[in-house]
Structure formats: structure tokens, C-alpha cells
Amino acid sequence: MKLSKEIAALADQHLKSVDWRENSEWMNFMESVSVMCMQSKLEKMSMETNAGLAQKEYMSITSKLKEEKSLREQSIEKLLASISILDEGEEQKSNFGQDDLLQVAEYLNEQVNRRKEIELELKEAIQIAEKASNAKSQFLSNMSHEIRSPLNVIIGMAHILQKEDHLQGQKENIEILNIASNSLMLLINDILDINKIESGKLELENTSFDLRSLMNNLIKAHKSSAAEKRNHIGVQIDENIEPFYNGDVVRIGQVLTNLVSNANKFTNNGAVEISAKELERTDSGSLIRFGVKDTGIGISEENQNRIFDKFTQAESSITRKFGGSGLGLSISKELLGLMKSKLHIESSLGAGSYFYFDLFLECSVQQRVSQSQFETARDLGGARILVVDDLDYNVIILNKILNDWNVVLDSASDGMEAVEKIQSNQYDMVLMDLQMPVMDGRGATEEIRKFNQETPIIALTASTDVSLKTELLQIGMNDYITKPFNPKELYLKLERSLCLFEV
């Protein structure tokens, strides 16, 4: 083995009297010393290296621990802040410090269990509310059917009495009967509309309508009631307004009817004016402001928000003096919300009121409304119609109404009889009641469609469930009309269906 230079130099310095390089024993000794020195150097280098690495690791670990400590302290601060928020409203406040982690954990465990109990109670409350809502909907549906059926007879008979010969003194009585029955129908519709809106089942139509006819018909409908209050009722229509627009004419008319009825109700010896003004014109349509202004009792500023609540009027004395359900404005507000509009009011006590809303309506491309709406004489061209209803008075009323429209009528008292008659006779249309003994209207329609796909079937129903239309179309019916029906609406349905199947 080669000696290190450092060992050889030391040996030459201290062993001058010995020829150690030629002595094998000395050489072995020197080699051993060299090895030990080398090992000693290596160990020293290793220790120095390890010490350097340990110092770096120590510094790195220390830095990480400091970061983790800072994060821990921030987390604890946020945790204690959250606990403070949880304690808001509590009589006994929590007072935890940075080192009270065990107590904090116990507190949070209690809070989690408490929240779970509250969540369970909330779920049970929601289930109870849903059951109550379903029960209310079912009750309203049942009551709707029970009330609408006799009301259909009243409205139908009033229409028939107006057309038949009667004494001059009976004219006023018949008009009063008409007004009262239509007012009752509007009230029932308002109650049912609340239920539809709350359940999210009210759907808007989008059909072509004549705006000027809508406004003028409102005047005609309220002219008699305005005369009773000795009020002048008029209409102002912007000359720039187009004749035809697309929209839900029934709902727009319902809102305006509620506003006009209210204006007339709270005005005596005054004036009620309906207006329509174009605010803005685009390529597709117009932004129109509809308004109803009166010179009635007015509404104080503090009561103007209350009047939009359900079953609420400005003051209890108003209900006693003027009557009313307190539904009209609430319904109008909800309907306008569905049409992306809002009902506004300008009023002061004793100085009348002005209700208005802005509605964007698309111009109608079709620009045509059936002329039958304006014709007094109605003719269905001798169409053969089968009326299916188990109640004799419903059949009598339909016969009296339809006989003026140039039709050939036949009747059946239940669905089974209707199926047999359609198998052996040729009809252009069937008017089918839904609820009948032996076989109801649904079952009868399904049987008829097995052998007859062409004859249009229109359902007559007192139900207002919006899902009914889908169900009836699925079983093969072509349309439906809700009792109590307006004779003009019935005529338009029949006319449209007959034209549809003649093509």
C-alpha cells in the first residue's frame, strides 16, 4: 500500500536514526497508521457533512412547523369566530380560547347534532306543509267541480233567457242575473288561479288578439255596473297602437277586469277611464302602458302596499262598506309577474287612483281574428253533434244554445251509450262530459278511438287542473272546454274543430 505523504514526512522527521523504509516491520506499521489516518479523515468529513445536512433539515422542519402553527392559529381564530356567529341570539354565550380545542370539539359536536335535529324537524314540517297544500288543492278541485256544474246551468239559462221572448219588465231581472252569475264565476276563477300560481301550474297562452276589441268589450261588460253607481266609463286608445298583437288575451283581460271592477266599486258619481298608450316601438312589437283611472275614494300612502296581499283591503271598514274578497289586486299582481310586468299605483286619499302596468306585446303576424267573434248570426253548417252527459239539465241547456247555430243534435246519457251510437251513426263532432256513470268520458273516448280516429271529441269538464289537457290529448280527445262556459267560447271551439277536420 502506498503511504500517504503526510505520514512519510512525519516518519522521516522523527525517525532519522532508523532506516525505516528498508525495515518491513516499520513499513507495516506505517501503512497501518496511514489507514487509520485515512479512516479518521473520512469519518471527520462524514460527520461534517451529516452535521450540515442535519442543520438544513432542522431549519426546513422548523420553518414548516412555524407555518403549520400559524395556519393552526388562524384556523382556530376562524373557528372561534364561527362559534361566535352560532352563539348569536343565544342567552348563554361560549367563551373559548386558543387552547380550548377539546371543549371546542365537544361544542361543535353538540351543534352538529342540534342541526341534524332541526333539519329532521324541518323535513317533517315540509312534508306536513306539502300534505296540507295537496289537501287544499284537492279540496279546491272538488269544490270547483261542485260549484261550477250548477253555475254552468245558471249562466247557460241566463244566456237562453236573454235570447228568448220575455216581458219588458223581465229584462232588468235577466241582466241582474247575468251580472251576478258572471261576478260569481270571476270570484271562483280568482280563487282557483291563486291555487294554480302557488303550485306553479298556471300556463300563459300566446294567441293573436284584437287589442281595441278587448278594450271596447271591457267597456260593454262594465257599462251596466257603472250606470248603477252613476259613473261615466270611457276608454282612450293611442292611435299608434297596432290592431293585432300576440299574448294571453284572457289573462290581460282578467287583470284589466279586476282593475275596472275595483275602480267602479270605489267610485260614486264619478268617472272610470281605461287607457292603452304605446311607450316604445321595436321591429317586433310595442311596449304598451295599460291603465285604469278613477275619481273614487283613493288609497292612503301607508295602505298602498297592503292592498296587494291576499284577502286584504286597505282598511276593514272598506270591506264592510264596499264588499269584495280582496283577491283582485293580488291575482293581478301575480299574473303580471308571470308576464314579466309589474302593477303600479298612484293614489292619495280622497283623490282617486290610477293603476297601470307596462307590457311588451309582439305584433301579430296573422293579423286575423275569426269573424264569428263579431257576427250575431252563427252557423255551423248543419253539423251533426252528439252531446254525451248524464245530467238532463246540461243536455237541455246545450240543446237550447246549439239549436241556434244550425246543427243536428243527438244525445247519450253515458259513455257506453255514446260508443254504441257512434258505431251505428255518423257524427261530425262529439261533446263529451267526463264524469258519468256506467262508463265515463275517458273510457268512452278510448273505446271510440279503437274504431274511429276522425271524429273530433271535445271534453266538457268542471275541472281546472292544467294537467288535464295533456291527459285528454293522450287518450284521444281533441280539445276541452271548462264549465261554466261562455257560449261564444263554445262556438269558437266548435267552429275551429269542425274547420280543422274538414281540411
Image (spheres, helix red, strand yellow):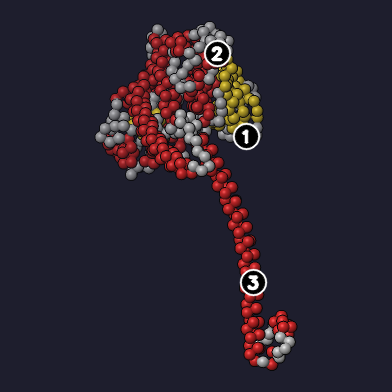
Q: Please give the name of the residue rendered at 46% of the width and 41% of the height, measured from the top-left corner.
A: 103
Q: Which residue is mark 3?
A: 44
Q: Mark 1 Cα within 10 Å, few/some/many (few <14, many 20+)? A: few
Q: Helix or strand or loop: what does disc 1 sit on?
A: loop
Task: Check disc 1 and give the amino acid type.
Answer: Ser
Task: Check disc 3 and give the amino acid type.
Answer: Lys
| Labelled disc at residue 300 | 2
Image coordinates of residue 148 in percent, x first then y, are 36, 24
The first of marks 1 and 3 along the sequence is 3
Task: Check disc 2 and give the amino acid type.
Answer: Ser
The outermost residue toward the left is 438
Q: Mark 3 Cα within 10 Å, few/some/many (few <14, many 20+)? A: few
Image coordinates of residue 235 in percent, x first then y, are 57, 17
Spatial CA distance of label 1 from label 2 is: 39 Å
Q: Is residue 389 visible?
A: yes
Q: Please give the name of the residue rendered at 64% of the width and 22% of the height, measured from the top-left corner.
A: 239
Q: Which residue is mark 1?
A: 284
Image coordinates of residue 483 in percent, x first then y, are 38, 26
Q: Is residue 222 visible?
A: no
The first of marks 3 and 2 along the sequence is 3
Q: Helix or strand or loop: what does disc 3 sit on?
A: helix
Answer above or below: position of 135 versus 74.
above
The first of marks 1 and 2 along the sequence is 1
